[in-house]
């Protein structure tokens, strides 16, 4: 499935954004300058349309242009935390074997860059194979990685469709519209919940 088709399916599944922020080019430019490479357009389209938000009961989507739930800060903190892990020689789905490297790096062009996390302890990473093709590595919270050569939008479609997007047996299917929960933007913000379009058809 092409990136465009996957993105269209995800946007149809999620429906109209609650906030029409539009592409925030300056914030993305600053983030990508930190990283030294561009993030995928389908990822940026989804983030610009819906983040920051708690999605599908589990996923946290940050945004680079907000003070709270800031994506640039979250990526930097997550990269730092993962870089401090002492990796042994046995990792299920070891990214080093797939990426052709002896060292596991984070937040670099030849390493793993975090895109989002979940309240189940999962972390989803972007990487590129030796030919430069994008890869999605989903880590299940127990340092076990599941790799797919798919666009980010396709990974998100799988997750929200109850497929095993974070490894065998990981899928959770919630029938009906996709649930959104706003993330508090101030300490006094009570938050709100809403739902995407009906998915029964």
Image (tube, rainbow, N blue to C red):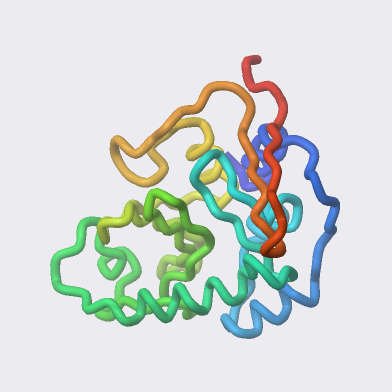
Percent across and percent down for residue 114 are 48, 66
Against 119, residue 96 (above or below) is below
Quarter containing the N terminus: top right
Q: Quadrant of residue 145?
A: bottom left
Percent across and percent down for residue 102 are 25, 79
Against 83, residue 144 (above or below) is above
In-image side of 62 versus 148 (left or right): right
**Could you tell me how many numbered marks the image carries?**
0
Residue 89 appearing in the image? yes
Against 113, residue 45 (above or below) is above
In-image side of 59 versus 72 (left or right): left
Point 63% across, 57% down: residue: 43
In-image side of 109 versus 95 (left or right): right
Point 51% across, 31% down: residue: 161
Front-lying residue, 8 or 88: 88
Point 41% across, 42% down: residue: 165
Against 13, residue 114 (above or below) is below
Percent across and percent down for residue 179 are 62, 35
Point 68% across, 55% down: residue: 51
Farthest top residue?
201
Quarter containing the C terminus: top right
Q: Quadrant of residue 103?
A: bottom left
Residue 42 appearing in the image? no
Percent across and percent down for residue 116 are 52, 59
């Amino acid at each position: 499935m092409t990136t465009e088709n996957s993105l269209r399916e995800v946007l149809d599944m999620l429906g109209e954004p609650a906030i029409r922020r539009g592409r925030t080019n300056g914030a993305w430019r600053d983030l990508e300058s930190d990283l030294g490479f561009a993030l995928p357009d389908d990822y940026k389209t989804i983030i610009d349309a819906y983040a920051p938000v708690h999605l599908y009961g589990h996923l946290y989507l940050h945004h680079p242009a907000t003070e709270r739930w800031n994506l640039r800060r979250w990526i930097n903190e997550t990269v730092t935390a993962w870089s401090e892990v002492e990796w042994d020689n046995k990792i299920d789905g070891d990214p080093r074997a797939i990426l052709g490297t002896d060292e596991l790096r984070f937040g670099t062009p030849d390493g793993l860059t975090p895109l989002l996390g979940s309240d189940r302890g999962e972390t989803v990473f972007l990487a590129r194979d030796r030919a430069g093709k994008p890869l999605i590595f989903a880590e299940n919270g127990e340092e076990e990685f599941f790799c797919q050569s798919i666009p980010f939008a396709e990974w998100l479609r799988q997750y929200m469709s109850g497929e095993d997007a974070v490894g065998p047996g990981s899928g959770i299917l919630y029938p009906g519209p996709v649930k959104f929960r706003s993330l508090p933007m101030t300490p006094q913000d009570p938050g709100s919940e809403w739902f995407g379009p009906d998915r029964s058809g």
